[in-house]
Image (cartoon, rainbow, N blue to C red):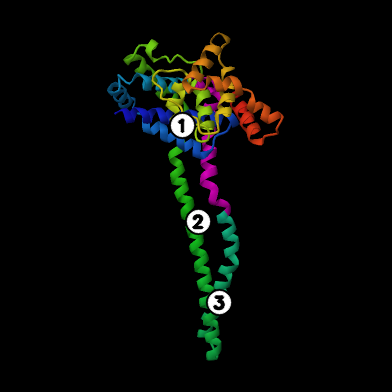
C-alpha cells in the first residue's frame, strides 16, 4: 500500500506544477484541462484515499510530504480562486474540437472542381447511350470517367476521414467541459481533514525551512544534470534537514554549481536560521570546506570569464526563486 501513497504524493506534485504553470501565464490549455480533470476523476472518492492513508498510518515522513503538497494546492487555489473559477473551459472545447474546421473548409474548396469534373465525365459517358458515337470516343469517355471517379473518391475519402476525426474530437472533448479546480480544492480540503484526523497536526507539520513549491521548482531544474538520481520527495526532505531523507549525490564536476545553489537558496531562509541551515546542508553533502573556498566561483566565472553555462545556471535559478 505504500506505493499507492507515493503515487498520490507524486500526482499532487504534478498537479501543483500544473497549477504553477497555468498561473505563470494566466492561461490554461486543453491538455492541462485534461490533466486536472483526470486527476480529479482518479481521486474523487475520498473514502478510497482514507483507506490508503489508514493503511500507511506509520509512514510519517510520506504523510508529512503529502500534507505539504495538498496544503500547497489549497493555498494556491485560495489565492487565485477568482481567476481559476473564471477560466473559460468551453472555449477550450471549441478550440480543440474545431481543429479540423479549417482543414474541412479547405478540403471542400479543393474537392469542388474535382466533383464537377466527375459529374461532367459521368454526363459525357451517359450521353453515349443516345445517338451514334464511335467506339474510340466511347472508350475515351470511359477512361476520363473512371479517372475522374478515382480521383474524386480518393478526395471524398479524405474528407470523410476529416469529418470522422472532428466527431471523435468533439466526443472526446465533451468529457472535459467542466472546470475542476473548485472540485479539486474541495477534495484537497477533505484529504487534509483526513490527515489531521489520523495524525496530530504537530506531527504532520514539516519543520520547513523551504516550502514545497520552491523546492519542487528547484528539483525540476536540477534533478538530472546536477544530482544523481533521486525523487522530489527525498529532495524536499533533504533540503528541510529531515532525518528521513537519503543522501543526495552531486554529479561529478557540478560542486561549484551546488555551492551557488545553496548560497542562493539560503537567502530565502530567515536570518536567524540561515547560517544554521546552510552549515547543516553543507555537512550533509560533505563539502563544507569546499564551499568556503569556492562559494563565489560560479559568479566569478559569469562576470570575469564570460562563462555562458555559469550565466545560464545563475540566471535561470534567479528566475525560479524570484517567482
Precedes in sequence: disc 1 or disc 2: 1
Q: Could you say which disc has been placed on residue 192 in the image? A: none
Q: CA distance from mark 1 to mark 3?
A: 60 Å
Instruction: Judge depth for marks 1 and 2 and give the one in front.
Output: 1
Q: Could you say which disc has been placed on residue 162 in the image? A: 2
Rendering coords of residue 299 (x, y %): 66, 26
Disc 1 is placed on an element classified as helix
**Along the viewing direction, whichever of 79 and 159 lies nearer the viewer:** 79
> Is 179 rendered above or below residue 190?
below
Q: Is residue 9 left or right of residue 316?
A: left
Magenta includes 100? yes
Residue at 64% from the left image edge and 29% from the top image edge: 315
**Disc 2 packing (10 Å; few <14; some 14–19; many ≥20):** some
Precedes in sequence: disc 1 or disc 3: 1
User: Which residues are drawn in magenta?
Assistant: 75-102
Q: Which residue is mark 1?
A: 14
Rendering coords of residue 187 (x, y %): 40, 24
Residue contact at pointers 1 and 2, CB within 8 angstroms: no
Instruction: Judge depth for marks 1 and 3 and give the one in front.
Output: 1
Rendering coords of residue 211 (x, y %): 50, 19
Q: CA distance from mark 2 to mark 3?
A: 26 Å
Q: Which residue is mark 3?
A: 121
Residue 122 visible at all: no
Q: CA distance from mark 1 to mark 2?
A: 34 Å
Magenta includes 86? yes
Disc 2 is placed on an element classified as helix
Quarter of the rendering occupied by the C terminus:
top right
**Disc 1 packing (10 Å; few <14; some 14–19; many ≥20):** some
Rendering coords of residue 163 (x, y %): 49, 55
Give the overall secondary structure of the magenta segment.
helix
**Disc 3 packing (10 Å; few <14; some 14–19; many ≥20):** many
Residue at 54% from the left image edge and 34% from the top image edge: 28
Amino acid at each position: 500500500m505504500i506505493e499507492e501513497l507515493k503515487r498520490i504524493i507524486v500526482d499532487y506534485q504534478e498537479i501543483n506544477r500544473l497549477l504553477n504553470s497555468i498561473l505563470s501565464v494566466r492561461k490554461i490549455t486543453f491538455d492541462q484541462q485534461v490533466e486536472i480533470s483526470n486527476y480529479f476523476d482518479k481521486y474523487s472518492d475520498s473514502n478510497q484515499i482514507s483507506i490508503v492513508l489508514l493503511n500507511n498510518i506509520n509512514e510519517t515522513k510520506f504523510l508529512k510530504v503529502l500534507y505539504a503538497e495538498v496544503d500547497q494546492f489549497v493555498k494556491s487555489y485560495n489565492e487565485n480562486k477568482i481567476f481559476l473559477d473564471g477560466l473559460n473551459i468551453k472555449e477550450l472545447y471549441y478550440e480543440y474540437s474545431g481543429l479540423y474546421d479549417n482543414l474541412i473548409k479547405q478540403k471542400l474548396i479543393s474537392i469542388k472542381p474535382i466533383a464537377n469534373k466527375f459529374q461532367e465525365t459521368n454526363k459525357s459517358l451517359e450521353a453515349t447511350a443516345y445517338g451514334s458515337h464511335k467506339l474510340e470516343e466511347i472508350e475515351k469517355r470511359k477512361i476520363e470517367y473512371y479517372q475522374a471517379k478515382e480521383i474524386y473518391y480518393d478526395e471524398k475519402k479524405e474528407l470523410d476521414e476529416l469529418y470522422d476525426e472532428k466527431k471523435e474530437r468533439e466526443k472526446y472533448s465533451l468529457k472535459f467541459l467542466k472546470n475542476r479546480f473548485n472540485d479539486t480544492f474541495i477534495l484537497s480540503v477533505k484529504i487534509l481533514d483526513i490527515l489531521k484526523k489520523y495524525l496530530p497536526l504537530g506531527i504532520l507539520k514539516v519543520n520547513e525551512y523551504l516550502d514545497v513549491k520552491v523546492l519542487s521548482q528547484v528539483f525540476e531544474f536540477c534533478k538530472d544534470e546536477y544530482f544523481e538520481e533521486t525523487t522530489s520527495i527525498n529532495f524536499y526532505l533533504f533540503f528541510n534537514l529531515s532525518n528521513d531523507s537519503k543522501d543526495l549525490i552531486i554529479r561529478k564536476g557540478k560542486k561549484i554549481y551546488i555551492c551557488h545553489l545553496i548560497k542562493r537558496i539560503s537567502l530565502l531562509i530567515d536570518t536567524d536560521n540561515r547560517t544554521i541551515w546552510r552549515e547543516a546542508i553543507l555537512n550533509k553533502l560533505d563539502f563544507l570546506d569546499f564551499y568556503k573556498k569556492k562559494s563565489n566561483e560560479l559568479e566569478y566565472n559569469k562576470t570575469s570569464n564570460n562563462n555562458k553555462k555559469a550565466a545560464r545556471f545563475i540566471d535561470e535559478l534567479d528566475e525560479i526563486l524570484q517567482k
